[in-house]
Amino acid sequence: MIEATSTTSGNLIAADKVNGTNVYNMAGDKLGTVDDIMIDKISGRAIYAVMSFGGFLGMGAKHNPLPWATLKYDAQKSGYVVNMDKKQLQDSPSYDMNSEFKWTPEYGRKVDSYYKTTSYWN
Amino acid sequence: MIEATSTTSGNLIAADKVNGTNVYNMAGDKLGTVDDIMIDKISGRAIYAVMSFGGFLGMGAKHNPLPWATLKYDAQKSGYVVNMDKKQLQDSPSYDMNSEFKWTPEYGRKVDSYYKTTSYWN
């Protein structure tokens, strides 16, 4: 696929360019990176940021979906900041990035409940 | 990059999977496909769908950014429907997909103005 846009402007960015953005905790420690954004294809709203923070471990690497509302963009860091520590993320819902994953409303509710955010799923 | 999510649920979809979705006019004619989604990285809102409708012509193929508000998702078609004809799209702001493109607020305003949508840019 040919790149649609090679240069962005301000806060506007091609959705797939968000992949790779760093995620930090409040203390400024790098927790991981955004691997993917899950959107609602009707409203165009980002619902989850799928991140990985254990990729450097090799096998057993996980994807951790975080509700979009838990992320704040920090322009100075050029990354997202989440108000949680590594332990909280390690205990959070995740799935193996090397196996087929079937996203379900049940899984989504589990994620929303863990982070105590308004649920995307009714 | 390893695929974060291979299966979606309902309207939830990985942002980069929207690429390739068909776009139709009200008469049901296929106008083209979505090549990319431009989002606001802070709010997580989709602002533009970057589409191409002349790709089959080969050289001189264009990207046409459409304000997200002009797209309606049609579940039966599994695609987006826009209320405009080919002529309107052919005259619309576009850029060569084979050369470097620098997105600017001015360009964004031109797009928003052409489609008479509320501008993302102040």
Image (cartoon, coloured by chain):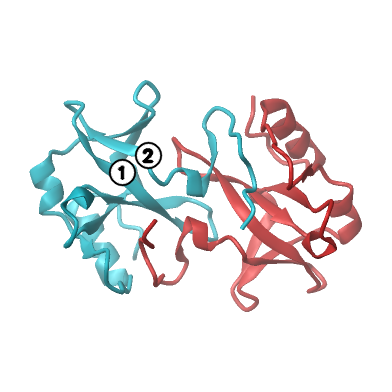
Chain colours: A red, B cyan
Q: Which chain is indicated by disc 1?
A: B
- Looking at the rendered structure, the kind of residue marked 2 is Thr
The image quadrant of residue A7 is: bottom left
Q: Which chain is indicated by disc 2?
A: B
Tag 1 or tag 2, which sits nearer the N-term?
2
Residue depicted at x 40% and y 24%: B75
User: In the image, is B94 to the left or to the right of B45?
Assistant: left
Label 2 residue SS? loop
The image quadrant of residue A33 is: bottom right
User: What residue sits right under mark 1 in the picture?
Assistant: B33
Report x, y in % for residue A62: 78, 50
Are the residues at dot 2 and dot 1 in contact (C-beta closer than 8 Å)?
yes
Give the camera-side residue of A20 and A110: A20
User: In the image, is B4 to the left or to the right of A32?
Assistant: left
- Same subunit, labels 2 and 1: the answer reads yes
Residue depicted at x 39% and y 53%: B36
The image quadrant of residue A23 is: bottom right
Give the camera-side residue of B96 and B48: B96
User: What residue sits right under mark 2 in the picture?
Assistant: B21
- Looking at the rendered structure, the kind of residue marked 1 is Thr
The local crowd at label 1, few if under 14, some if 14 to 19, many if 20 or more residues have their Cα within 10 Å, is: many
Q: Is residue A111 above or below residue A77?
A: above
Report x, y in % for residue A53: 78, 60
Label 1 residue SS? strand
The residues bearing labels 2 and 1 have C-alpha atoms spaced at a distance of 5 Å
Q: Is residue A22 above or below residue B72?
A: below
Report x, y in % for residue B120: 36, 58
Residue depicted at x 39% and y 28%: B78
| The C terminus of chain A lies in quadrant | top right
